[in-house]
Structures are given as C-alpha cells and as structure tokens.
Image (cartoon, coloured by chain):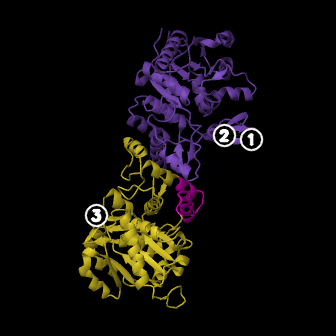
Chain colours: A yellow, B purple
Amino acid sequence: MSKLSKVVALAGGVGGAKLVDGLAGSLPPEALTIVVNTGDDFEHFGLHICPDLDTVCYTLGGLANPATGWGRVDETWHAIEGISALGGPAWFRLGDRDLGTHLERTRRLRAGEKLSQVTRDLCRSWSIPYTVLPATDDSVSTWVCTDAGEMPFQEYFVHRQCQPQVTGFRFQGAEQARPAPGILDALHAADLVILCPSNPWVSIDPILAIPGIKDAVSSRPALAVTPIIGGQAVKGPAAKMYRELDIEPCAHSVARHYASFLTGFVVDQVDEKEVGAIQGMGIEVLLADTLMKDRSDRLRLAAEVIQFAQENLLRWPSNNTGVESV
Amino acid sequence: MSKLSKVVALAGGVGGAKLVDGLAGSLPPEALTIVVNTGDDFEHFGLHICPDLDTVCYTLGGLANPATGWGRVDETWHAIEGISALGGPAWFRLGDRDLGTHLERTRRLRAGEKLSQVTRDLCRSWSIPYTVLPATDDSVSTWVCTDAGEMPFQEYFVHRQCQPQVTGFRFQGAEQARPAPGILDALHAADLVILCPSNPWVSIDPILAIPGIKDAVSSRPALAVTPIIGGQAVKGPAAKMYRELDIEPCAHSVARHYASFLTGFVVDQVDEKEVGAIQGMGIEVLLADTLMKDRSDRLRLAAEVIQFAQENLLRWPSNNTGVESV
C-alpha cells in the first residue's frame, strides 16, 4: 500500500470545512492543499466577503462557531444590530469578529493584493499551517437561474432563503478566470484529489469551471465524499436543487455528476443500496458513516477516506510518471 | 428681552456635542439647527467615517459613551481586535456598534445619497428631533501642516497622537465646496449663532472655510464659548496648537481668533482676568462655569448662554429686516 503524500481537497462551506478539518488531523501540513470555492464571494457594504474561505479558515484555525459551523465562536452582533436600527439591509448576518476579517481583507485587496496572498497571510495570522487557496484570484460569481429570474448566489441563498425554484447555474467570469497560483502545480503533484461533501452545483462546480482545474483533477485519482445522505443534504439546498432539476437527490446522482473523472466515491452507510449502481460506473466505493456531528467524526471519516484511497486508488498513475505506485 | 427662536450652533466633536446637548435641553426642536464639522471625516477600511457628526448624533440620541464622550455606550471591540490579530491597522479604534453606523452610511453614500440626507435619516432612526447638518456634502479635508510634513487630520490626531509640531492648517477642497442644503437659510434666519467650545483651528475653522458660511455668520449675532479654560483645552490639542503657533493659549486668543465677526463670548470663571481685554475688542462677555462634567452642567451652561444672549446680543439686527428686536 502506497502512502498518500500529496492530497488536494476541493471544498465549499460547512460540510467541506468539516472534512478538511478531519484531513488536517490526519495529514502533515505539507501533504494537504485545500482549494476553496469563491463563487459565493460577494460585495456587501463595500466589503469583499468570502463565505467559504472564511468557513474553512475559521474551522482550521479553531475559530469557528461549533453550533453553526459557520461564523466565529463567541461572536457578537452589535454592528448588524446598529445597521438594522438604521433601516439598513441586515439580511446577511455580519458578526462583529467576522467583520474584522472582511474589513482587513477588503483593505488589502483594495491596496492591490491578490486574494490568494491575503488568504495565505490570514492563515499565517491564525496559525493555520495548511495551504489554503481560493479557487481563483479573479472574479467568478455563481448566479442561480430560477423561476424568479437569475440572481447572485447570496441573494438566492441568504436573502431569499433558497425559496426560488432552481433551473440552472452560471459561473460569471469563469471562462476568463485563472486558477489561483499554486493550484495547478498542487493538482499535478497530487496523489489524490478529494471532493469534499460540499454542494456539487454551487460549491464544487464553480471550482471546476475555472479553465485548467477540471483537466488537472481528471488526470489524478479523484474521490468524492457524498454530500447527500438518505436523499437529504446535511445542510443547504443541494437536495432541493437536485429535485428542481428533475434529478433524484441521492448519492448515485452525485457520483454521476462527477462520473467523467471520478475514481472513488464515499457513500453513507444508509445508502448501501446505491453502491452497486455507482460501482457499475467503474468507480470504487467506500461505505462509511459520513455524518460529521463532532470533531471525532471528522477525524474518523478522514482517516477512513485516506485508508480507502491508499488501498484502492493509488494504483492509478502517480505524478505524471506513468509508474504504478502500488 | 427678546426670546431666541432660531439658533444655529457650529460644533466639532466632544466639547461641541456637550453644549449642543445642553442647548437641545433648552430649546424646542424647531429652534435649533446644528452645523457639524466634516473636516475630520476620512476614509478608513473603505468606510466613510464622520467622527464629529457621530459624536454629536450619538450624544443627542443618548447613544454616546458617557465615559469618553465619543463612541457608543456599551460598545464592544471585536472587529478591531480581529483586525489587530491579522496585523491590520488598528490605530483608529472602531467599535462594533459604531461600525454599524459607518457601514450603513458608507453603503448609502456609495448608492449616491448625500451626506446631509443620510445624516437626516440617521437622526430620524435615532429619534433625534433636531436638525443636524454636516457643514458640506462635498469633500473638505483638514490637513495639518507640521514639522513632520503635512498630514490628514486623523493621521495627526489619532495615529500620531498630536505629537508633530503644528505650523498651520489647510482645508483641502474648501474653496470648491458648498454649504450643505439648509445651512445658509438657517444662518440667515438665525437670531443667534453659537460657536460651541470646539477647537477653533480644526473644528470651527473648517466650517467657516466653506464659501458663504463665514459671511452668513458675520451677518448675525454670534457668540462663542471658550474651549480654553485656564490655558488648557478641556480635551484635544487646541492649547498645544496655540502654543506651537506662538499664540498664548487663552480665552482672549480664542476671542481674537473670531474677533472679525464675534458679538459675544463666554469666558470661564477661572479666566476672569481676561474679561477686560475681550470687552476691549467690542465683544460682550459672559463669565460662567464652562466645564461640562455632567449633563446638568450642559443644561446649566446652555441656559446661561441663552439667557445672556437674549439679554445682551439680540439688540443686533434680526432676520435681515433691520428692525431692532429689543
């Protein structure tokens, strides 16, 4: 059995951050690169807000609110209460500690720094030893196409609370965007790419939409962890989106979503009946308890994923050398 | 004795806000218009911050921190702590509640609203029934000329803690600026203009530098309350500035500062020896306890100022009619 020495994880928000946290507990810093969705990023009150990057970094830095999975622990809400008292738009709940991040990041971006530079420095300040990369330094915005028209992701997700019926997605700016520096190198050097249990439509697809990333992922062993358990998303609108797009929300649908490049898939134990169909697509399957209720779940699932990959996926060509690693 | 029916107060930060608060306790809402210095306004973290407007409004709205005179009561500092942890510029202490104001004001200014509109709406939200006007909707920035070069006011005042030696002042943009809507009308209709106990150089002069305001003030009875007591400023660098400009920091110097248009002056009781010299400039003098330690001091001083003005200053022409009001 070959040992994983280079893993790249693609992650969105809460679910992705949880698995990333588990992986960070199983892999040394030099073995883990995390590529985070920036399609949800938006400008609000003139601040550049990166919800998924913050969720991942707060989680890795031990700063996340354990109750919600997003936002900061010991958070206060005085600024947004003040905005609300003035009749301002308070639908996006900006916490006071969280605001510090948005203010400083926005200041540095305005001063001409790249998001990847700022993210690297934020991680350093928060004592996060892992490499966290935004998918791109360019502007790529997820737009949700719905029966109520097209709208930016946060408008759909937070303001409209995922009420409109989804008909599709658009990643504005993706065609002209470039992967953030380091992503393609990390992917090409990866023994394994892990697609975290994040929403395929709005967390992983915006990353894969950036030219070069999907090709690089396709050249490596790639494993996805299902974000759908028993027909439900653990959090967020993934299952609702599948239904509205006339696709059954199930692990099998997620595997099919990624089928063109997927080599391994982690199905929840409650969905054992789907294993055969997924294996039928030529994908290796791990059946596991994928619900991460606490930190020990994250560590356990990550360890299982890593062991499964080492035992089953690394026979794929590694490091572009064409040499079998087993 | 004529009764004051229209008063315009020119105010800077803490000292001005205290007297304005006292005046608000003595005059009905329709009788008091407050014109606030905007020369200290600056952009920080992309936010449009108006320190004097906020101090005046927080004070009038009962939202001010009673210990400092500026900032919000029950304030927390989580955002700026977060910025500090990221190595960002934390020299300007942005409170969390205060940030709500800056964020909402900045959002509305970016949406094309004028500062005077935003200020009116903020006052409405804070149940402030008095008319509070920024000196101008245009950009006028106070620059401090020092032995360490010219610098924007907040850089001098907060970041450098008034350390550099002052050689002069410059109100950038003043020549092209227009008084905010309502100011000239209020001044022309005023029975009395009160120059609050604010720094003459950097709180009152930037207001008077806006074309039209000084002429309008000069056409009305105008009374100043000294910001210098026993050679000291109650707060801030006024006395230090006078010294560095080779002028004795004393009530007499303040009166001379405004002498070209001043009709009345309020000297602190500890400076009784200066009364004769000020009267010698043709200015009526009230000797009073001008130190406002608590709200009752504010109300008492405001009542004394109003009574003094009614008894001594309203013999001046009123309302452009040329008719004596006594």
Dot 2 crowding, Cα within 10 Å, few <14, some 14–19, many 20+ = few
Q: Distance between the residues labelled 2 and 3?
A: 53 Å
Dot 1 alpha-carbon crowd within 10 angstroms: few under 14, some 14 to 19, many 20 or more: few
Q: What stretch is highlighted in magenta?
A: A104-128
- State the residue at coordinates (36%, 83%): A259
User: Which residue is pictured at 43% across the width and 65% down the height?
Assistant: A21
Q: Earlier in the sequence, mark 1 or mark 2?
A: 1
State which chain disc 1 sits on. Answer: B
Closer to the camera in the image, B91 or B13 = B91
Can you give x and y, in whole percent of width and height, for residue A195 in the image? 41, 75
What residue is at 54 percent from the left and 22 percent from the top? B193
Are labels 1 and 2 assigned to the same chain? yes
Disc 1 to disc 3: CB gap under 8 Å: no
- Badge 1 vs badge 2, beta-carbon distance below 8 Å: yes
Amino acid type, label 1: Ala
Task: Give the label on residue A164, or none.
Answer: 3
Q: Please name the residue that numbered disc 2 is placed on.
A: B160
The residue mark sitting in front, 2 or 3, is 2
Name the kind of residue labelled 2 in the image: Arg
> Viewed as shown, does residue B247 lie left or right of B37?
right
- Name the amino acid, label 3: Pro
Q: Residue at x 55, y 89 (%)?
A: A321
| Number of numbered discs overlaid on the protein picture | 3
Element type at mark 1? loop
Q: Name the residue under label 1.
A: B148
Mark-to-mark CA distance, 1 and 2: 10 Å
Q: Nearer the viewer, mark 1 or mark 3?
A: 1
